[in-house]
């Protein structure tokens, strides 16, 4: 992509969004600064920690390492887009609350999005699969045990279809 502005039309949390972006503009900046979706957190700014994880066409990506123009024609889902239209929390969100699977909470939105992607891919993952999958995101507070337990619990909760 050259130095000119790009027009992007994508769906963010089920809402069509259209905007112009600079070639170097990252998805996290559009989400946080333009769309006020501040649940997605910026930490390492290198795509290594997972705090900024969102789902792009259902696959987890680091929004700090994804150019905004790359989302043209795609579906972006952030932690704000998980709850059902009736307000019911996503099973992953509910399980994280019930299992106290967070301490400071900074990595939690990225962890929740990563867990959602896993359960969409494999609705009944075994403990080792969860451990390996969730190890892609860094949590400096919990030691992961409560996170793993929350994902196990979320796999047992029916997904609301009222989106």
Image (tube, rainbow, N blue to C red):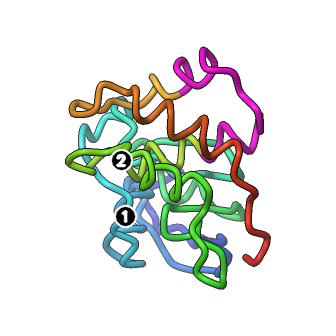
The magenta segment is 116-133
Image-based side of 64 in relation to 77, left or right: left
Question: Could you say which quadrant of the image residue 32 lies in?
Answer: bottom left
**Residue 107 makes an appearance in the image:** yes
> Could you say whether the residue bearing mark 2 is in a helix, strand or loop?
loop
| Alpha carbons under labels 1 and 2: distance apart | 18 Å
Image-based side of 139 in relation to 117, left or right: left
Q: Which residue is mark 1?
A: 39
Classify 83 as above or below 99: below
- Give whichever of 137, 73 is nearer the camera: 137
Mark 2 Cα shell of 10 Å, populated few (<14), some (14-19), many (≥20): some
Q: Between label 1 and label 2, give the one nearer the viewer.
A: 2
Q: Earlier in the sequence, mark 1 or mark 2?
A: 1
Q: Could you say which disc has been placed on residue 100 in the image?
A: 2
**Residue 9 makes an appearance in the image:** no
Mark 1 touches mark 2? (CB < 8 Å): no
Question: Could you say which quadrant of the image residue 103 lies in?
Answer: top left
Q: Residue at x 52, y 20 (%)?
A: 131
Secondary structure of the magenta portion, mostly?
Answer: helix
- Give whichever of 134, 25 is nearer the camera: 134
Image location of residue 57, percent across then percent down: 71, 53
Image location of residue 82, percent across then percent down: 59, 65
Classify 141 as above or below 79: above
Looking at this rendering, what residue extends furthest in the front direction?
Answer: 98
- Give whichever of 161, 34 is nearer the camera: 161
Image location of residue 155, percent across then percent down: 69, 42
Q: Residue at x 76, y 78 (%)?
A: 162
Q: Residue at x 66, y 37 (%)?
A: 118
């Amino acid at each position: 992509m050259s130095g000119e502005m790009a027009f992007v039309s994508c769906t963010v949390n089920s809402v069509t969004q259209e905007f112009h972006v600079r070639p170097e503009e990252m998805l996290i900046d559009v989400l946080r600064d333009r769309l006020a979706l501040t649940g997605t957190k910026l930490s390492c700014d290198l795509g290594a920690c997972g705090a900024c994880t969102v789902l792009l066409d259902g696959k987890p990506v680091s929004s700090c390492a994804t150019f905004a123009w790359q989302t043209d024609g795609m579906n972006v889902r952030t932690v704000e887009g998980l709850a059902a239209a009736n307000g019911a929390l996503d099973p992953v969100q509910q399980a994280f609350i019930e299992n106290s699977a967070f301490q400071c909470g900074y990595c939690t939105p990225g962890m929740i999005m990563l867990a959602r992607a896993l359960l969409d891919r494999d609705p009944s993952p075994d403990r080792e699969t969860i451990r390996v999958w969730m190890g892609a995101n860094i949590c400096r507070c919990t030691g992961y045990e409560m996170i793993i337990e929350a994902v196990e619990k979320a796999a047992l909760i029916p997904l609301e279809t009222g989106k």
